[in-house]
Image: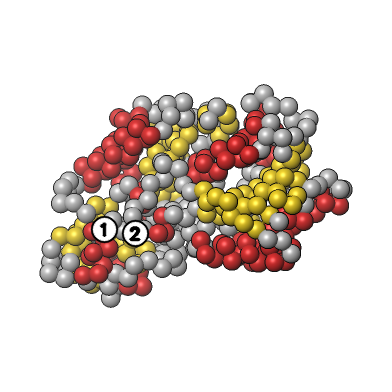
Amino acid sequence: MRGRGRTTGSGGGVRGPRKNVDIRRGGVRLDDEGAWWVRAGHPWVYRKTLKHDAGSASEGRGGGLMEVLDPRGRFVGRGYLCKGGAVAMRILSTREAPRGVKGLVRKAVDEAVSIRESFLPPDLTTYRLIHGEGEGLSGITVDRYGQYAVVTQYCEEAGFMIEDICEAIGERTGLEGIYLQKRFKPVSEKKQHSAASLIWGRRAEVEQIIHENGMKFYVDVRAPVSVGMFCDLREARSKVYELARNRRVVNCFSHTGSFSIYAAAAGAREVVSIDISKKYLAWSKRNFDLNELDTNPHDFMAADASTGMARLSKKGRGPYDLIILDPPTFSSGKEGFVLKNDYPDLLESALEILNPGGLILACCNAVKISDDEFQRLISAGAVKAGRTLRILEKIGLPVDFPQVVGFREGAYLKAFLMAAF
């Protein structure tokens, strides 16, 4: 596993609008500023703004909904307390009705499904079905993979919603089964993870085939960490398809080869897929076969990204025309990879084998790293390489990842298409 920390969970340490709150009997009371932000749709109340400890306040309640009030005791919203992490309370609704969990969940699911039915093409079978932070179910996401879905739970206290979510999804979508993956802490390669558990419907076969923009991919909805596809990069993959024809492409941290498939299908002259995991490289080759793409013009290299690009340079195989950098937030490769520390060196390695005027697609999914900070890391790599980078396009999240206005933490994906000179 490449060890991606792709979450929309607690976002530990991300600074949001200040909400000073006071936990009172029967609910949580916010000051005027905090109440305004919640009414505007911000789904998180940060622990550091609490006057009292939210964990102790939630003991004995058994989880579930609590009312949020303004200083004058007027209704602001409903949410639930979380005992750990940076987020002390997650807001689920700012409306008086429905009052109960079942009604609130059903309303959120109905709205989410209706958006997908309106905006997504009917032949797309993998997408974010419910983007919890942006759709009234904070602490939960649901991704669809063919006839199965994976619910990801980001805090223990969110469990009270899951049964109602499964029931509502089953009625609206006709899925065959739903799996649960618990992510109470960021994904890390240094600890063992449990496989997803079946919580609704019938058990899935080992692999499912999903469809995206005419391409097919194998996924495993039971896998402990990654099913094999990241839905939030769909727009970035489409951009690679637009650009890759007749170009020589390097796909770093290639995972199961989704970017590589798009590039090869577009008519790239050569695609080099680099990943530390031989398992994922084998998975990539199977995805090539699934799409009836000849692997002979292409290469699959088992190495960490910088080492792999250095090998290409040493063998005189460059320069290349398009390099894709989609690193994990952290990794357990031989030397490990920490995005904040290692990104400049990674980018320097890429620029050493990139044509003048060549393109780099740089992606970052870390909530903790802002747009400005990511650009600083990119700039540091460009300076080390003695090159100039120009941003041609910023690629955001697809329509199935809606974001509440004012909730800047929701725009966690940074993807820059850049030209190098």
For disc 1, the neighbor class at 10 Å (few under 14, some 14 to 19, many from 20) is some
| Amino acid of disc 1 | Ala
Which residue is at 37% across, 51% downward? 403
Residue 180 coordinates in the image, percent (x, y): 43, 42
Q: Is residue 203 visible?
A: no
Q: Is residue 51 visible?
A: yes
The amino acid beneath tag 2 is Gly
Figure quadrant of residue 179: top left
Left or right: 374 as drawn, with respect to 257: left
Q: How many labels does the image show?
A: 2
Give the vertical position of 416 relative to 388 (above or below): above
Color encoding of the figure: secondary structure
Mark 1 → mark 2, Cα distance in angstroms: 8 Å
Which residue is most to the right? 315
Dot 2 corresponds to which residue?
406
Q: In this view, does 49 lie above or below 149?
A: below
* Residue wearing tag 1: 40
